[in-house]
Amino acid sequence: MCGIVGYIGSREAARICLEGLHRLEYRGYDSAGIAVVRDHALDVRKVVGKLLNMDASLAEKPLPGTLGIGHTRWATHGKPSVENSHPHVSMNGRIAVVHNGIIENYGELRERLRAEGYVFKSQTDTEVMAHLTQKYYEGDLRAAVIRAVKDLEGAFAFGVICADNPDVLVAVRRFSPLVVGLGEGENFIASDMGAIRKETDRVYVIDDDEVAYITREGVELTDLEGNRIEREVFVIPWPAEAAEKGGHKKFMHKEIHEQTDAMHNCLAGRLSAPDRPIQLDGLNMTAEEIRNLRKVVFTACGTAYHAGLVGRFLMEYLAKIPAECDLAAELRARNPVVLDNTLCVPISQSGETADTLVALRDMKEKGARCVSVLNVVDSSIARESDGVVYIQAGPEIGVASTKAYTLQVMTMTLMAIHFAEVRGTADPALLRELKAEMLKMPAYAAELLKREPQVLAVAERFYRLEDSLYLGRGVNLPSAMEGALKLKEISYIHAEGYSAGEMKHGPIALVDPELFTVAIAVHGDVYEKMIGNIQEIKARSGPVIGVADDGDEVIGRECDAMIWVPPVPEMLSPMTVAIPLQLLAYHMADLRGEDIDQPRNLAKTVTVE
Ligand code: F6R
């Protein structure tokens, strides 16, 4: 997904933009560009491919100037090329624009501008903004930007500079994320806080249809009518190093290893002892409202959807509320029935995923109360929700979601136990046991991380195979689906996550010695059935990697290789199972030499539908 950065101050803008762009690399990109104002002229540099090309280009020929904007592009309109990469420049060469989002009416605007004599150099939607700003410019850049965005439909976060205004950077947003970083004698813009965290911990989070007028001395926020907006400064609660790799080879590896601390953070203030009730502040619901619930609809994309499937299971099992879980991109099409007292739970790491945001808006319109489970504070989904329970995972940079998944599951488990407590729908002894085990979860995570060499050994045996099946049942069907997604997205090994019960209805035809199966067979309601499924695969000469509780000799004898996990109540096992499956995917991808933090064709945050 595109990333934008901008700088105004007394230092070299291009260097600061480039550093910020490096921190946005995790969003995924195919080309990059930087524009600066110098001596009342624009200087623009663009490269296709990795930012290393921009590093080399600036090292060879610097781009001096103290006002600049930078961009990493993830192609949506027009192929990756120098012409299509940002910044885009107005026809008169005076105004440069960087953009994240999609201008939906750009075709119509392009025709109109063409008829007025504007010449387009790229196939992008963004170029219309550069020309429109020129069209409306009468010496006041902010006024021109405001007038231009009023013509636009769609999503955008823009950074705009003008050679005739060397002391001004203008930024504006609608639906795409944007923050303004506050410095001393210098200020910044960026798509997310991590990009500029090294420079400052003080930011304004910009809302839809808000404009930031940024000089070296200060920042003025207005709406599109020019009315001043007072905004509290948000102090970024995590240190700069949190956005760096911290000694790990890859962000994904670092984030897998952060799960012990992250689990502590997630539980903090919510669960203190097995005999104390759970507190979930952000939920924003009274006990009566929880008791009156008639239906819960979880909705999310990708990994977060798998967490939602666990949520659905626990909500019905413990809180006895009819529950559904929909892929966000499918929710509208299904047109679900919203009863009185329906709760919708959108789940998202970034809080910016367009499909999830649209699903939230749809469900709100239908009358559902929406309480989101998110990681990024003050994100678009957070702002439109009736309540937000944060997973408190800290920044997740690796494209493949790891700690966010485990913490989404943890948060959903807290929510289901809490609802069960309030509604009195589960045996108090069971709830006490679950809470006691939840408190031990960080220690289980630490233990699982210590066992990484065992997982690496399994990866070494199987990473050359090209096909795999991940099987699970019940609460661990989502674990199988998530394990398969993790493997396929970073190693490009074909992986399918399936209900083990469905095997005999088709997928078993695939089984042969060249396809490995990961079978999740921890103790619980579906254990015996999983043993049967493992035997069916073994009978067809398929190699099986078992995921089972420590000391389970039965499974140990059946399988070709084992991943052992500490035994926990079955309801909680999606959290313990997730960690070694993340490590398995990581090591297989690493052994295959893949670009783990930036897998091909993927973006960390998908802000288009
Ligand atoms: C996979 C992955 C994606 C995201 C999905 C939703 O590892 O990260 O499937 O889970 O794009 O993103 P968020 O959670 O930001 O809404």
Image: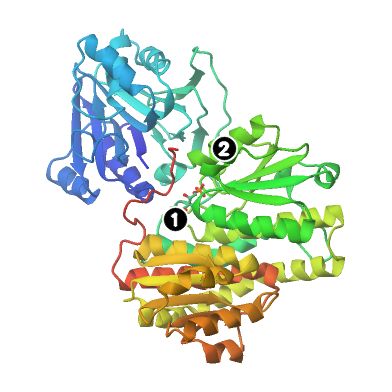
- Which of the 4 image quarters holds residue 463? bottom left
- Tell me whether the residue at label 1 lies in contact with that at label 2, contact meaning CB atoms closer than 8 angstroms: no
- Which of the 4 image quarters holds residue 513? bottom left
Most foreground residue, 119 or 200: 119
In the rendered view, tell whether residue 396 sits above or below residue 292. Answer: below
In the rendered view, tell whether residue 105 sits above or below residue 548. Answer: above
Give percent across and percent down for residue 289.
82, 41
**Element carrying mark 2:** helix
**Label of residue 557 in the image:** none
Q: Identify residue type, mark 2.
A: Arg
Which quarter of the image is occupied by the N terminus? Answer: top left
Q: Residue at x 64, y 60 (%)?
A: 410
Is 383 on the left or on the right of 253, as rendered? Answer: right
Q: Which residue is drawn at 61% across and 37% down?
A: 335
Label 1 beta carbon within 8 A of ligand 1: no
The residue to which callout 2 is attached is 332
Query: Which numbered mark, 1 or 2, is in the foreground of this view?
Result: 2
The residue to which callout 1 is attached is 241
Most foreground residue, 78 or 13: 78
Give how far apart the Cα atoms at labels 1 and 2 are: 40 Å
Is 321 on the left or on the right of 463, as rendered? Answer: right
Q: Identify residue type, mark 1.
A: Glu
In the rendered view, tell whether residue 425 sits above or below residue 460. Answer: above
